[in-house]
Image: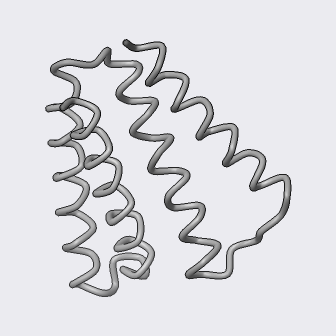
Amino acid sequence: MAWIMLVAASAVEIVMGLALKYADGWTRPVPSIIGVGAALGSVYLLTIAMRDLPAGTAYAAWTGIGAVGMTVLGMVLFGDPVSWLRLACIAMIIVAVAGLRFLET
């Protein structure tokens, strides 16, 4: 259950990142409010996951999943650069998060 909460926290963190991108430097109120609300929701879900997961594992996985999600969405939605090196780095983050998951048990 803790890993489900952690994945949910990471998904909400990705929503936060997207909202803040659309907030355009806090000049657009609706995405700004969504971003702040998502940030609070993400941290709340992370704290629930941390009840049963080691703090370092939970935090590293939370940030890693969020980073991968935002990087991929940046490529798809915003035309961020795509290169084999960037994709290799994303793959390494995924392997690292999976490693933390399986070493945690």
**Quarter-wise, where is residue 54 in the image?**
top left
Horizontal arrangement in the rendering, residue 35 relative to residue 78 (left or right) = left
* Quadrant where the image shows the N terminus: top left
Residue 86 image position (x, y, % from top left):
77, 55
Q: Is residue 67 above or below residue 55?
A: below
How many dots with numbers? 0
Colour mapping used in the image: one colour
Q: Is residue 10 above or below residue 6?
A: below
Residue 91 image position (x, y, % from top left):
68, 44
Residue 14 image position (x, y, % from top left):
39, 60
Q: Nearer the viewer, residue 21 or 56?
A: 56
User: Which residue sits at x=33%, y=66%?
Assistant: 15
Farthest-out residue, right: 84
Horizontal arrangement in the rendering, residue 58 relative to residue 9 (left or right) = right
Q: Nearer the viewer, residue 99 or 77?
A: 99
User: Which residue sits at x=45%, y=50%?
Assistant: 66
* Quadrant where the image shows the C terminus: top left
User: Which residue sits at x=60%, y=81%?
Assistant: 78
Horizontal arrangement in the rendering, residue 78 relative to residue 6 (left or right) = right
Residue 13 image position (x, y, % from top left):
34, 55
User: Which residue sits at x=76%, y=71%?
Assistant: 81
